[in-house]
Image (tube, helix red, strand yellow):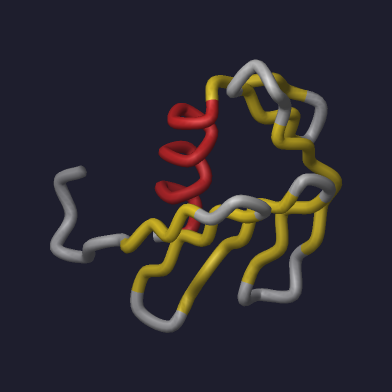
Amino acid sequence: MSRTQQAVVEVGVDEIVVRTGSKWIRFTHEWLESSEDSKIPSALNEDRTVSLDGKIDEMDIAAERTTWELM
C-alpha cells in the first residue's frame, strides 16, 4: 500500500479484524461489521474464500479490498 497509514490485521478462529487509526472492520462467519455502524452479510468459507456482498473472493483479496475502502 502506498499510503502513510498502516493497517493492523488480527486473525482469530472466528473473526478477522482490520484496524487503521480509530477505524476498524470485522469479518465473522456471518457478518462484515465496521466502526462506522455498517453491517452486511458475509461468510468465511471452508475453501478459504469470503462471500461478501454477493461476491466470492479469496480471503486475502477480500481483506485487501475492504482495507482500501476503510482507509
Taking the spot 54% from the left edge, 55% from the top edge, the residue there is: 12
Quarter of the rendering occupied by the N terminus: top left
Taking the spot 62% from the left edge, 76% from the top edge, the residue there is: 35
Taking the spot 39% from the left edge, 60% from the top edge, the residue there is: 71
Comparing 32 with 1, the one in front is: 32
The vertical placement of 30 against 44, above or below, is: below
Residue 5 x/y as whole percent: 22, 65
The vertical placement of 12 against 57, above or below, is: below
Q: Is residue 48 left or right of residue 65?
A: right
Q: Residue furthest front?
A: 13
Q: Residue furthest bottom?
A: 22
The vertical placement of 70 against 21, above or below, is: above
Comparing 27 with 36, the one in front is: 27
Residue 48 x/y as whole percent: 59, 23
Q: Quadrant of residue 64?
A: top left
Total tally of numbered discs in the picture: 0
Residue 27 x/y as whole percent: 65, 52
Residue 20 x/y as whole percent: 36, 69
Q: Is residue 56 left or right of residue 23?
A: right
Q: Is residue 45 left or right of residue 26?
A: right
Q: Quadrant of residue 34?
A: bottom right
